[in-house]
Image: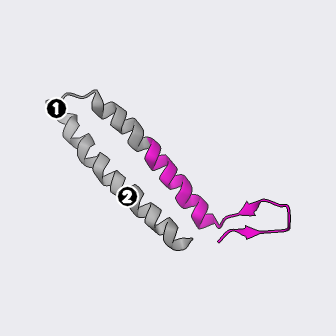
């Protein structure tokens, strides 16, 4: 839960929530960049399979981080 120090001051979230927030943000930005890169690859490209598999796995990781965040909140 966020903690308010005094009336009128900003709400401060716990360090664990802030870390999870930024981890998820970086993962989402990386997934967007990888997705844009993947759209330019042909299906015959040997790296296409690597990107598609990892894109799915990191998408699941983002989902799991979001579940952890919701649990901690």
**Quarter holding the C terminus?**
bottom right
Is residue 8 magenta-colored?
yes
Is residue 44 magenta-colored?
no
Residue at horizontal 58 percent and vertical 66 percent from the top: 16
Residue that protrudes farthest toward the left in the picture: 44
Residue 35 vertical placement versus 6 (above, below) = above
Task: Give 28 or 23, whichever is nearer the viewer.
Answer: 28
Residue at horizontal 29 percent and vertical 34 percent from the top: 38
- For disc 1, the marked residue is 43
**Quarter holding the N terminus?**
bottom right
The quadrant holding residue 46 is top left
Q: Position of residue 20 (x, y in %)?
A: 53, 60
- For disc 2, the marked residue is 61
Element carrying mark 1: loop
Residue at horizontal 46 percent and vertical 42 percent from the top: 29
Q: Position of residue 21 (x, y in %)?
A: 55, 57
Task: Give 48 or 10, whichever is nearer the viewer.
Answer: 10
Which stretch appears magenta? 1-29
* Total residue callouts: 2
Q: CA distance from mark 1 to mark 2?
A: 25 Å
Residue at horizontal 40 percent and vertical 63 percent from the top: 64
Residue that protrudes farthest toward the front in the picture: 8
Query: Are the two marked residues, 1 and 2, in contact with CB atoms closer than 8 angstroms?
Result: no
Q: Position of residue 24 (x, y in %)?
A: 48, 54
Q: Which mark is residue 15?
A: none
Q: Residues within 10 Å of mark 2 (few under 14, many from 20)?
A: some
Mark 1 or mark 2: whose residue is earlier in sequence: 1
Residue 9 vertical placement versus 56 (above, below) = below
Q: Residues within 10 Å of mark 1 (few under 14, many from 20)?
A: few
The quadrant holding residue 45 is top left
Q: Position of residue 2 (x, y in %)?
A: 68, 68
């Amino acid at each position: 839960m966020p903690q308010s120090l005094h009336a009128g001051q900003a709400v401060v979230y716990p360090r664990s929530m802030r870390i999870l927030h930024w981890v998820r943000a970086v993962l989402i930005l990386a997934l967007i960049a990888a997705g844009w890169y993947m759209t330019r690859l042909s299906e015959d490209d040997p790296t296409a399979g690597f990107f598609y598999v990892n894109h799915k796995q990191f998408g699941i990781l983002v989902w799991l981080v979001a579940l952890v965040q919701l649990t901690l909140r």
